[in-house]
Image: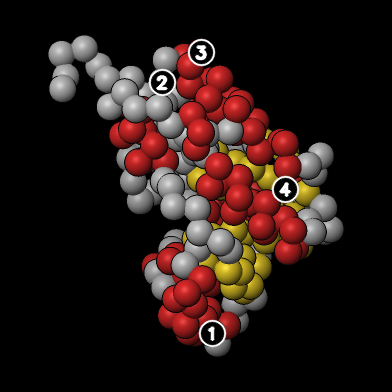
Amino acid sequence: MKILLYGGTFDPPHKGHLHLLESAMEYLQPDKVVVMPAGVPPHKKASATPSSIRLAMCRCFETLGKQVQLSDWEISRKGKNYTVDTIGHLRQCYPHGKIYLCIGGDMITSFTAWKDWQRLLRWCTLVALCRDSGQMEPFEQAAEALRCKGAKIVVLPVSVVKQSSTDLRRQLIAGNSAKKLLPKQVAEVVEKYGLYQQKEGKV
């Protein structure tokens, strides 16, 4: 049984996120996809958007197939969460499953700085989604270096969708329409809760 983990802050999830996950699913053909919004990541501040709302926005991923399920495991935990904790949880949930972890291509080069990275290499197969398909050589070199350390890793080039959640938030806060970059379900949640609006008194 193939279990694909797709995590992120998702504040908000956008069409680029959907495209990356769809590409990974088409390649791997997983039996189950676990979409897991981040709680408090170790490398950056916690999201200002309430976790329950981020989870609601992530329902957009369910349109990719019945095998996609949302998990609130990370956001329900207190304190910082590390990827090794999440993979350990999935190993308990699916003791006979083969776990695949989606990461950004740029994360390959810094992977050995992750907490318990050696354990992660034993526990799962890395799926590196490389959005700059014209610059694959450094990604492949970094992946090969990890393979020499025992990694099972797939380097998957995907077509570029030049968008980030940070840029989207800035556009929305500035009053610019970014609905065309958001899945319908996400746009509805953003409108319902009045997310990413400029606060009074601030320019």
Asked if the residue under mark 2 is in contact with the one under mark 3, i.e. CB atoms within 8 Å, the reply is no
The CA distance from mark 4 to mark 2 is: 27 Å
> Label 4's element?
strand
State whether residue 114 is above or below residue 172. Answer: below
| The quadrant where residue 159 appears | bottom right
The CA distance from mark 1 to mark 3 is: 46 Å
Residue 66 percent coordinates (x, y):
81, 39
Asked if the residue under mark 4 is in contact with the one under mark 3, i.e. CB atoms within 8 Å, the reply is no
Residue situated furthest bottom in the rendering: 148
> Label 1's element?
helix
State whether residue 195 is above or below residue 10. Answer: above
Asked if the residue under mark 2 is in contact with the one under mark 4, i.e. CB atoms within 8 Å, the reply is no
Residue 173 percent coordinates (x, y):
31, 26
Residue, x 47% and y 74% (percent of image)? 134
Q: Foreground mark, 4 or 2? A: 2
Q: Which amino acid does label 1 sit on?
A: Glu
Asked if the residue under mark 3 is in contact with the one under mark 1, i.e. CB atoms within 8 Å, the reply is no
Q: Mark 3 points at which residue?
A: 192
Label 4, residues with CA under 10 Å away: few <14, some 14-19, many ≥20: many
Q: Which of 88 and 143 is in front in this view?
A: 143
Residue, x 16% and y 19% (percent of image)? 202
> Label 3's element?
helix
Q: Earlier in the sequence, mark 1 or mark 3?
A: 1
Q: What residue type is labelled 2?
A: Leu
Residue 201 percent coordinates (x, y):
15, 13
The CA distance from mark 4 to mark 1 is: 26 Å
Q: Mark 4 points at which residue?
A: 33
Q: Earlier in the sequence, mark 4 or mark 1?
A: 4
Left or right placement of residue 26 versus residue 180 in this view: right
